[in-house]
Image (spheres, rainbow, N blue to C red):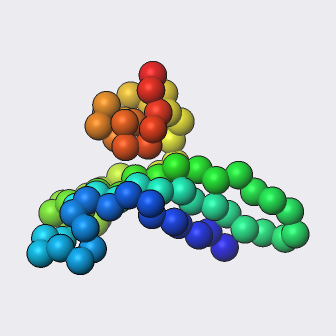
Amino acid sequence: MKSFVADSLHDALNGPLPVTRLTGTMVGVAGRKQHSGYPFVGIRTVTPFAEIETGIVEPTDPRLGPETLAALGISR
């Protein structure tokens, strides 16, 4: 099971605008041992889902721009 905990939302959930970006921590749970948490960022887009590339990448991946890295709290 994977649990996503969002701790930063822009715009607010109770505001007049939809949430455009959220960040937080993803934790995988399996068995009876502790697991590390990993930062995640989610950004609203108008691009059709079929055209979006998804995946897990290292912070050094050149596809991650400065805004995404900053949202994740990562500096290169």
**Location of residue 75 with respect to 72 vertically, above or below:** above
Q: Position of residue 69 (x, y in %)?
A: 39, 36
Q: Is residue 51 visible?
A: yes
Q: Which residue sits at x=45%, y=63%?
A: 6
Q: Which residue sits at x=75%, y=57%?
A: 35
- Relative placement, left or right, of 63 versus 10 is right
- Relative placement, left or right, of 72 versus 18 is right
**Location of residue 25 with respect to 56 vertically, above or below:** below
Name which quarter of the figure residue 2 lies in. Answer: bottom right
Q: Position of residue 28 (x, y in %)?
A: 67, 63
Name which quarter of the figure residue 73 lies in. Answer: top left
Q: Position of residue 33 (x, y in %)?
A: 86, 63
Q: Is residue 54 visible?
A: no
Considering depth in this image, is 71 or 46 the residue closer to the camera? 71
Q: Position of residue 20 (x, y in %)?
A: 22, 61
Residue at the far right in the pictured view: 32
Q: Which residue sits at x=38%, y=28%?
A: 62
**On-image quarter of the N terminus:** bottom right
Considering depth in this image, is 64 or 13 the residue closer to the camera? 13
Picture mark count? 0
Considering depth in this image, is 10 or 63 the residue closer to the camera? 10
Residue at the far top in the pictured view: 76
- Relative placement, left or right, of 11 versus 53 is left
Name which quarter of the figure residue 76 lies in. Answer: top left
